[in-house]
Image (cartoon, coloured by chain):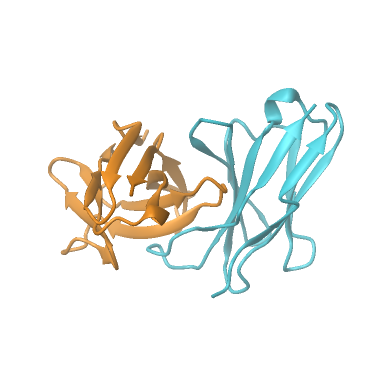
Chain colours: A cyan, B orange
Amino acid sequence: EPEVTQTPSHQVTQMGQEVILRCVPISNHLYFYWYRQILGQKVEFLVSFYNNEISEKSEIFDDQFSVERPDGSNFTLKIRSTKLEDSAMYFCASRAGQLNQPQHFGDGTRLSIL
Amino acid sequence: AQKITQTQPGMFVQEKEAVTLDCTYDTSDPSYGLFWYKQPSSGEMIFLIYQGSYDQQNATEGRYSLNFQKARKSANLVISASQLGDSAMYFCAMREMMGGGSNYKLTFGKGTLLTVNP
C-alpha cells in the first residue's frame, strides 16, 4: 500500500539554524499538509498546499516557515531560524481529491532544537 | 470555530474485551466529517475510520466501529476484541473546510491513551 514517507526521522539542530524537513506524499494525491505536535499536546495544523501554492496557513505558520514542492514528488517544510519552541514532531500528510478521503500521515520527523 | 472534545485522558481495557473511546464535537456546518487516528508510542499517525455527517449508517472497519449520534454530537470509537497492539493514543479529528473548494484541515482532540492489559 502506498504511504507518505518523511525524512529524517529525527533532526537535532542548534537554535537559530535553518532546518528542512522532507516528505514524499502518495503519488496521485492532490492536497498536501504539514502539522505539528508539541510533546504531550494536540496535533496542530500548519499549512495546506494545493495546485503548487499555499491554500491555507495557520497563525503558527509565520515568516520563519516556508513550503515547497520543487520537483513534483518532494514536499518540504523549511524553518529559517529555529527557536526552542519549534521543538516538536512534524507530520506531513497528503490526500486524494474526494472530500471523504482521509489525510494519510507520514511517520513524522521529531525536531529537537538545542 | 470547530471544537473536538475527548474527555478521557486514559482508558484501560482487558485483552479481548471491547472498549469505547468518547468524542464529542461542535460545529455549525451542516456537512462535516469525523476521523479517528491511532498513534502508537513510535509516533506515527494511522488513519482508522471515517464518518460523514450525511452517512446513513455508522462506519465500520474491521474491529473498529463508530457509534455516531448526530443529535448528541458524538462520534465514539468502539474497538472490539482488544489486542495488546491496540495500546496507543487515539485521536478524534474533525474536517474543517478551507477556501471554498474541496480542501480541508483537521482539528484534533487532545487524545485518549488506551492501555490494553493482558
Q: In the rendered image of this protein, does residue A6 appear above or below residue A41?
A: below
Number of marks in the rendered image: 0
**Residue B101 percent across, percent down from the top left:** 46, 57
Relative side of A50 to B13, left or right: right
**Residue A105 percent across, percent down from the top left:** 55, 56
Q: Nearer the viewer, residue B69 or B42?
A: B42
* Residue positioned 21% across, 62% down in the render: B55
Q: Residue furthest front?
A: B118
* Residue positioned 30% across, 37% down in the render: B11
* Residue positioned 28% across, 58% down in the render: B52
Query: Based on the displayed image, in which of its 4 quarters is residue B79 positioned?
Result: bottom left
Query: Based on the displayed image, in which of its 4 quarters is residue B8 positioned?
Result: top left
Q: In the rendered image of this protein, does residue B86 appear above or below residue B2?
A: below
Query: Based on the displayed image, in which of its 4 quarters is residue A29 positioned?
Result: bottom right
Q: Residue furthest top?
A: A84
**Residue B74 percent across, percent down from the top left:** 21, 43
Q: Residue furthest left?
A: B71
* Residue positioned 31% across, 51% down in the render: B32
**Residue B48 percent across, percent down from the top left:** 38, 59
Q: Quadrant of the N terminus of chain B?
A: top left
Q: Nearer the viewer, residue B62 or B108?
A: B62
Relative side of B15 to A25, left or right: left
Q: Is residue B49 visible?
A: yes
Q: Is residue B29 visible?
A: no
